[in-house]
Image: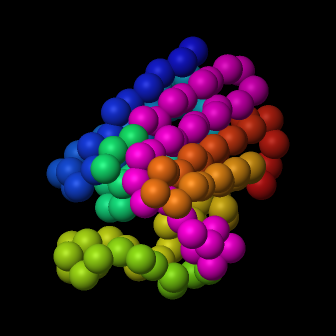
Amino acid sequence: MQFQYQIEGGNFSRAGFASSEIKKLMKQLNVDLSIVKRTVVATYEAEVNIVAHAYGGTIYVELDEEKIIIKLVDEGPGIPDIEQAMKEGYSTASSTVREMGFGAGMGLPNMKKNADDLKISSEVEKGTTVQITMYFKTEK
């Protein structure tokens, strides 16, 4: 199965919609709840990063009996230093985003902690691609 969701940059009222839909789908398919939870946490963090930092993006979901692959592609400023951005507490969020309770610098670290496989590529002034993979038959 394949799905996709359009994410609007700056639209915090819709932040989390795609990850919620993915959660519903995985539960309907009787995926182990611990895997559902980890998938939703990682996807939500990536989705909020699109809303907070990019002009917009697309979430692509590919699901089969063994795994789910979630690929988030955004159009935004990109991440100049991915290694630095992976450090807990590091954030480039604006003061407005922080005042709303987002931008604490835990997004990328939380993605890494919850994904079985995480790949991030970014190009400054073009955007970022995040791929989250969860395997259904393994324990983390």
**Residue 36 seen anywhere in this rendered image of the structure:** no
Front in this rendered view, residue 87 or 75: 75
Magenta residue span: 58-85
Question: Where, by quadrant of the figure, is residue 68 drawn?
Answer: top right
Horizontally, residue 63 falls left or right of residue 90, namely right
Q: Nearer the viewer, residue 32 or 67?
A: 67
Q: How many marks?
A: 0
Which residue is pictured at 54% across the width and 18% down the height? 2
- Check the image and report above or below for 60 versus 93: above
**Front residue (pair 7, 35):** 7
Is residue 44 located in the magenta-colored stretch of the structure?
A: no
* Residue 80 picture location, percent across and down: 57, 69
Quadrant for the N terminus, please: top right
Instruction: Judge from the rendering whether residue 111 lies leftward or rightward of residue 93; answer left or right.
Output: right
Side (left or right) of 133 relative to 49: right
Rendering coords of residue 28 (x, y %): 48, 24
Query: Could you tell me which residue is drawn at 32 percent across and 71 percent down?
Result: 102
- State the residue lying farthest toward the front: 125
Is any part of residue 31 visible from this angle? yes
- Residue that appears at 67% across and 20% down: 64
Indicate yes or no whether the magenta region holds residue 67.
Answer: yes
Where 106 falls versus 62 (above or below)? below
Q: Against 53, is 99 above or below?
A: below
